[in-house]
Image: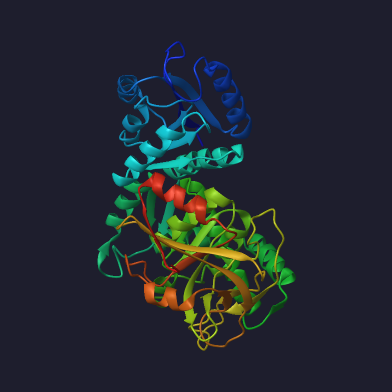
Amino acid sequence: MSKTRVSLVFTHRPAEEKACVWPYEGYDYDKRKNQIIRNLRTNCPDIEFMPVTLCKAEQAEALVKESKNIDGYVVYMLGIWTGAGNVIARSGYPTIFVDDLYGGSGELLTSLSNAKKEKLPVIGIASSNFQDVANAIKLFKVIRSMKEAKILDVVDAEQRGGITPLSSYANSIKELFGTQVIKMNSDELISYYNAVNESEADKWADKWINEALKVVEPSRDNIVKSAKMYLALKRAMEDRGANAVTVDCLGLLYKNKLPAYPCLAFFQMNNEGLTGVCEADLDSTVTQLLMRYLTGRPGYVSDPVIDTATNQIIYAHCVASNKVFGPAGPSNPYLIRSHCSDRKYRSEASVQSLMPLGEVVTTLKINVLEKAMSIHQGRTVANVEEDRGCRTKLAAQVDAEKILDNWNKKANWGWHRVTFYGDWKRQIMKLATLLGIRMFEEDK
């Protein structure tokens, strides 16, 4: 990945100016700038900062015209009343206003409120904790990662749900994130599958079987087929330089165009720090990929079930990671099960992951066509044992009535949601603003 490039803009009135302004007359701006630059380069080593000082709006207009190949602006307000922030906010680039406390406070508050009224991609940081500044600036790296990412979409159909052309999704994803969607049909995937080395597939099957608490329904042959699917998808991704993959698993398997479900393949990919998503769901794939770059953790795509009697939401699916805190984190127990909906007819392998309890989780979904994101939070309370529905069932305590009333209220996010361990709400909302995505809190 190429280095993230940020235009670091310091704003203040001329140092020699005699005026009653903050911080105070004669303030050593250069000394403060050097301190900030050192701190930023230490805390954000993967980001290239290009410092510049602006004292008036006209200088900001010239800077915007000259700016090329940057991922965004950081406007560090050391003093007040330059007007530069308002100009940069309208540049179209993601922008972060930072208040150097007791220096730029008045200008940050007025300029940020103007940007919010105009719904510009601008966020503000006003904190005495420098880490808050660094964390916000690191969002530019997420944006850069998405610009350079590729999604492999394995599907034969030309329309999503028989309605929306897949090209519309691909174009919307490209427009919103810069991410490229590469389509591959089932015949191409089968050619990769048939080329897999059987002994290598046996090793992966042995690993999954040995590390599982139990293999319940599937035969070893079906688990080996899943291993071949994993190796086939990984090779296809490598050949195309893809960072994520999604497969029309239900549609293709029901039409006998796939030899196995990719459930265990996605289980392994997500454990490794890659992104594998079922059902050719590009909205969920983009959501999981974006959050992988933000958190370093896999997402859990699910078909949620709401239970207002217990005030819970149960996230249910047959694909799940067992390393919810990321590849370097601890592993939770899992069972190898048959796929839920057709288990009477097949012994296709899937996963029942027994995920950690007592943890805050953040659940979201992006609708790329409407440029909208839903979000809610909860605390995990149970791994539900229920024969109906999908295999993994993670229950979280939430405001179930609110979520039920608000489901798809502001956009069509469908049934799927994507859950991540941890409290990521503030960072997600900042990132959404920088990307021009409108947010809707489902539990408010």
Residue 71 appears in view: no
Q: Is residue 51 above or below residue 382?
A: above
The quarter of the displayed image where residue 414 is located? bottom left
The quarter of the displayed image where residue 443 is located? bottom left
Please say which color scheme the image uses: rainbow
* Residue closer to the observer: 421 or 32: 32
Residue at 36%, 36% in the rendered image: 93
Q: Is residue 162 above or below residue 88?
A: below
Q: Is residue 4 above or below residue 303?
A: above
- Quarter of the figure that contains the C terminus: bottom left
Residue at 43%, 74% in the rendered image: 402
Q: How many marks?
A: 0
Report x, y in % for residue 212. Answer: 71, 72
Report x, y in % for residue 215. Answer: 68, 79
* Residue closer to the observer: 363 or 267: 363
Report the side of 159 relative to 429 (left or right). left
Report the side of 64 relative to 391 (left or right). left
Report x, y in % for residue 17. Answer: 42, 13
Residue 172 appears in view: yes
In the image as oriented, which residue stretches furthest toward the top?
A: 16
Report x, y in % for residue 399. Answer: 49, 74
* Residue closer to the observer: 89 or 362: 89
Residue at 34%, 35% in the rendered image: 89
Residue at 49%, 47% in the rendered image: 239
